[in-house]
Image: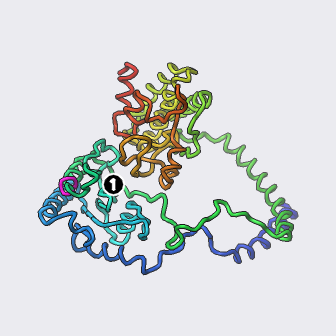
């Protein structure tokens, strides 16, 4: 480093350090929930520490004593089978609550309060079920059975609550085993008391002219110096063998188009097939190899058969989705990779499940990506994957065929076998 460069870097650090020290705390950090808004969480957590079945007094009629006895027996059975505690919470969860009506947020916060892993199942005023599995050796994604999740009679929502809870617990305890994991909460409510405050998405930054003048010169020199180091590093990296492709993470694609063109689908499909083929090269012994090979076979056949036919747009979208699933199987070393986002499977891997009703489909929990997890139903409808039809663009779930039947793999583990049947291959 020559003398001029040393001066430039030193000047930049001298100017920037005081500015950083004087900078206010990050505005993006949520305002802590006031202590008085935490009372309900503390009350429920304290009750669960003594009794794993909690029924709020406001919803006491939802479960009579006989029903509670049956639910307790089912909870005990499930706990013994899966090897972790089972907690059931029956409580109203209005939009004015500390979790703003989001049952998944409530369960995450209760788990944090209680400090115990296990299966947490919640029933709110809608009589829908919400479940979160903290350290539970069960793969809930694979459950292609929504019995018990929602009431059969919307007019008398709690009439069969005990039966539904018993059924749901039995389904969960019979789900396939998997290594225990801790689910993530990808989106959180707005700061308490500011739920209706409008906030700009990207606040405009207006730096004083003098600050810009002082920083521009030093940073320009530092940037040039950094660029020189980058060139050297790049040249070294070109001579260094790349790591195996299977170790590369399958990235998310939240900005994938809702109405992709055939050209875009062909180009992206070709890229994904190449990446999967490269990832399989050094995958001997990988638990996800068999899934990846099958995924590559069906995706390549679909890609070749579909060509540039606009009527095969869903098949081309399926090529992208299946190829990414195959690569995810290798990356995560599993024969059962997580399903894609139901709203738009081109978004990539799902992050959580949420209740939704798109179009005239029956409302149920669907896997969604992190980008779709906290959006309104109107926003989700605008992000839904669509293809052109005789009457204009149609949502992917409204087009009869193999992709509607399998929901692009979001409805269970039968995607690859169903595609093999569809293509007539083994």
- Magenta stretch secondary structure, dominant: helix
Q: Nearer the viewer, residue 331 or 121?
A: 121
Answer few, some or many: residues within 10 Å of disc 1's Cα (few below 14, many 20 plus, some between 14 and 19). some
Q: Quadrant of residue 166?
A: bottom left
Residue 72: horizontal and vertical position, in percent?
A: 16, 62
Q: Nearer the viewer, residue 391 or 417?
A: 391
Please report the residue visible at 53 percent of the width from the left and 46 percent of the height from the top. 252
Q: Position of residue 64 (x, y in %)?
A: 16, 65
Q: Nearer the viewer, residue 369 or 276?
A: 369
Q: Would residue 290 be visible to someone looking at this image?
A: no
Q: Please tell me in which quadrant of the rendered image residue 292 appears.
A: top left
Helix or strand or loop: what does disc 1 sit on?
loop
Residue visible at 48% across and 50% down in the picture = 377
Is 262 left or right of 402, judged from the image as shown?
right
Residue with the mark numbered 1 = 180
Q: How many marks?
A: 1
> In the rendering, at what x and y percent does residue 225 appear?
80, 56
Residue 117 percent across, percent down from the top left: 31, 63
Q: Which residues are magenta?
A: 161-165
Is 382 one of the magenta-colored residues? no
The reply, left or right, for residue 29 in relation to residue 361 is right
- Which quadrant of the figure contains the N terminus? bottom right
- Taking the image as shown, residue 148 lies to the left or right of residue 402, namely left
Q: Is residue 409 left or right of residue 89?
A: right
The picture quadrant where one finds residue 73 is bottom left
**Residue 2 visible at all:** yes
Q: Quadrant of the C terminus?
A: top left
Of residues 213 and 368, which is closer to you in this image? 368
**Residue drawn at 20 percent across, 50 percent down:** 167
């Amino acid at each position: 480093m020559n003398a001029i460069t040393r001066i430039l870097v030193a000047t930049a650090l001298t100017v920037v350090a005081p500015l950083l020290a004087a900078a206010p705390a990050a505005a993006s950090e949520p305002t802590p929930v006031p202590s008085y808004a935490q009372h309900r969480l503390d009350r429920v957590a304290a009750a669960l520490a003594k009794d794993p079945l909690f029924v709020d007094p406001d919803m006491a009629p939802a479960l009579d004593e006989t029903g509670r006895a049956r639910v307790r027996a089912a909870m005990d059975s499930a706990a013994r089978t899966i090897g972790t505690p089972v907690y059931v919470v029956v409580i109203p969860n209005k939009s004015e609550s500390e979790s703003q009506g989001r049952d998944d947020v409530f369960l995450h916060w209760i788990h944090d309060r209680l400090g115990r892993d296990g299966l947490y199942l919640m029933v709110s005023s809608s009589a829908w079920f919400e479940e979160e599995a903290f350290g539970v050796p069960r793969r809930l994604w694979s459950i292609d059975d929504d019995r018990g999740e929602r009431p059969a009679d919307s007019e008398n929502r709690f009439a069969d609550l005990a039966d539904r809870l018993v059924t749901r617990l039995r389904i969960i305890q019979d789900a396939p085993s998997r290594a225990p994991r801790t689910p993530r909460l990808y989106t959180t409510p707005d700061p308490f008391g500011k739920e209706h405050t409008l906030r700009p998405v990207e606040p405009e930054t207006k730096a004083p002219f003098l600050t810009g003048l002082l920083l521009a010169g030093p940073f320009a020199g530092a940037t040039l110096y950094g660029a020189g180091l980058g060139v050297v590093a790049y040249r070294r990296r070109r001579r260094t063998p790349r790591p195996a492709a299977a170790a590369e993470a399958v990235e998310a694609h939240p900005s994938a188009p809702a109405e992709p063109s055939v050209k875009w689908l062909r180009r992206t499909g070709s890229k994904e097939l190449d990446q999967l083929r490269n990832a399989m090269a050094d995958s001997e012994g990988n638990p996800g190899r068999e899934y990846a090979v099958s995924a590559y076979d069906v995706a390549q056949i679909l890609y070749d058969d579909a060509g540039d036919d606009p009527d095969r747009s869903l098949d081309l979208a399926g090529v992208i989705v299946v190829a990414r699933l195959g690569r995810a199987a290798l990356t995560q070393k599993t024969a059962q990779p997580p399903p894609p986002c139901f709203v738009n499977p081109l978004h990539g891997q799902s992050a959580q499940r949420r209740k939704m009703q798109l179009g005239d489909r029956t409302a149920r929990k669907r896997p969604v990506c992190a980008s779709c997890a906290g959006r309104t139903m109107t926003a989700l409808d605008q992000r839904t994957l669509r293809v052109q039809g005789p009457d204009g663009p149609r949502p992917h779930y409204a087009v009869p065929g193999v992709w509607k039947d399998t929901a692009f793999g979001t409805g269970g583990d039968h995607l690859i076998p169903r595609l093999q049947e569809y293509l007539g291959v083994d």
